[in-house]
Image (tube, rainbow, N blue to C red):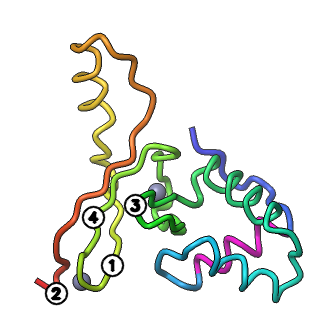
Amino acid sequence: MKITNQKLTRNQEIVLNLLENSGEPLKAYTILSDTQKKGIKAPTQVYRALDKLIEIGKVHKIESKNSYVACNISNCTAMTSTSFLICEKCEKVTELEKENLKSFFGGISERLNFEYSDHNLEIFGFCNTCK
Ligand SMILES: [Zn+2]
Ligand SMILES: [Zn+2]
C-alpha cells in the first residue's frame, strides 16, 4: 500500500524535486552532481534518499539505464514492481499504469512452483513522435 503524505526529509525532498522537475529519467551521477550543488555532500545520502523514495513509490528505478524517474501516477501501486515503455530513439519513458502485470507474473510463477516477489519490466520500441 502506498504511504501518502509521508513526511520527507530535506534530502529526500531535494532528490524528488530534482526528478520531478526534470520530467525524464536521471542517472545516479547526474542526481549526485545536481544535489551536491544544493548542499548534499555524500553520495550515500543521495542513495539513501533514493532508496526511501523508491520504497514509498515516489520514484522508480529503470534498471537497464541505471537511472531514476519520478512517478507521476497519483496512486501508483507499483512500488518495486515496475513496467515501462522505453523509446529506443529519444529514451522517453512511459510507465504502465494499472496494467502492471503483477497478477500475470504471479500466476505464471505459481505454475512453475516459483515464489514471485516483484519484477522490473522494460519494453523497448518507439514512442508516438519517433515511430
Ligand atoms: Zn509509478
Ligand atoms: Zn521517442
Magenta portion: prevailing SS class: helix
The residue at label 1 has a CB less than 8 Å from ligand 2: yes
Rendered residue at 30%/56% (across/down): 122
Q: Are marks 2 and 1 in contact (CB under 8 Å)?
A: yes
**Residue 79 vs residue 13: left or right?**
left
Rendered residue at 57%/61% (across/down): 59
Separation (CA) of disc 1 from disc 3 = 14 Å
Q: Which residues, given as a range, are shown in magenta?
A: 11-20
Q: Nearer the viewer, mark 2 or mark 3?
A: 3
Counting other residues with Cα less than 10 Å from the Cα at mark 2, is it few (<14), some (14-19), or many (20 or more)? few
**Residue 59 vs residue 89: left or right?**
right
Separation (CA) of disc 2 from disc 3 = 20 Å
Separation (CA) of disc 4 from disc 2 = 13 Å
Rendered residue at 73%/60% (across/down): 47
The amino acid type of the residue labelled 4 equals Leu
Q: Which residue is mark 3?
A: 64
- Marked residue nearer the N-terminal end (4 or 2): 4
Q: Which residue is mark 2?
A: 130
The amino acid type of the residue labelled 2 equals Cys
Helix, strand or loop status at disc 4? strand
- Marked residue nearer the N-terminal end (2 or 3): 3
Helix, strand or loop status at disc 2? loop
Query: Where, by quadrant of the figure, is residue 43 drawn?
Result: bottom right
The amino acid type of the residue labelled 1 equals Lys
Q: Are marks 4 and 2 in contact (CB under 8 Å)?
A: no
